[in-house]
Image (cartoon, grey):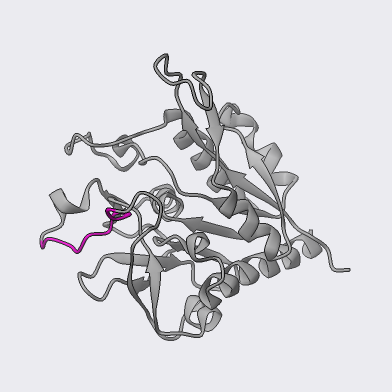
Amino acid sequence: MSQSPIILLTLRGKPADDTRRQPTPYAFEWSPSSFGAAITRAGGVPVMLSNECDPQIVPLAIKRCDGLFLTGGEDVAPEYFGESDTVGNLTVNASRDAVELAAIKAADEVAMPILGVCRGVQVLNVARGGTLYQDLDQQMPQKPRDHSRGPDGFFVQTHEVEVSGNCRLDSVLAKARFQAATSHHQAIKDVGQRLKVVARSPEDGVIEAVEEPGDRFVVGVQWHPEVRAQDPETIRLFTAFIDACRQFAGRR
């Protein structure tokens, strides 16, 4: 049996709330089970990175794992890309920002594979010196299509994504256009260092994926592949990520 790589998976948070009774009024951390399921189906073993960690010890967790998976969730605080809140609708998690930025830095130092989804691609871009649209509807020069989850409370709406040719994502997905689940109000504005735009929304030009050119697997996608778990594109993306993590583990 081939080695099952250990994947460090980030968490979102909920603050304490005296008015909430379910599942608990206390502060807690969580992740949709679809993230862990996607990692497990591809052959990896997900472990959780708590936002309660001191950022200074996050490199110790990186040293014990084989891949970093940056999940979706809260907005990245604009202070990390040189701005203040100008839109009034941000949900930030200061502890998560600090922990994830430390994790990306530590992963970069050892050339660990990284996969980012939704917020994950955004925080990856910020860690590399890039910026974000704090809110697409308020800040894009031309009004974008609706990139939010949509009106349904359970299902997530989809839109088309167009992948550039001659890139890692193109070879992994083996499809130039496909329908992807969308649930976000922020997106990449200025691209960070050592990242290349490899997919966009053909309707409005919103950046849908970036990657690091070269041999190392560093890919961030704006859509939510885990929502469409049985899609070939989802299976291929997570399989490629876990394969890269397995190879990384073998080289250590």
184 horizontally vs 56: left or right = left
Front one among 251 and 120: 120
Residue 7: % across, % down = 68, 52
95 horizontally vs 52: left or right = left
Magenta-drawn segment: 142-151
Where 87 sits versus 118, above or below?
Answer: above
Q: Quadrant of the N terminus?
A: bottom right
Toward the left, the furthest residue is 142
Toward the right, the furthest residue is 1
Residue at screen point 55% across, 77% down: 232
Q: Which image quadrant is residue 43 in?
A: bottom right
Residue 196 visible, this orientation: no
Q: Quadrant of the C terminus?
A: bottom right
Residue 77 visible, this orientation: yes
Toward the top, the furthest residue is 18
Residue at screen point 45% across, 36% down: 97
Front one among 37 and 52: 37
Residue 107: % across, % down = 60, 50
Front one among 190 and 73: 73
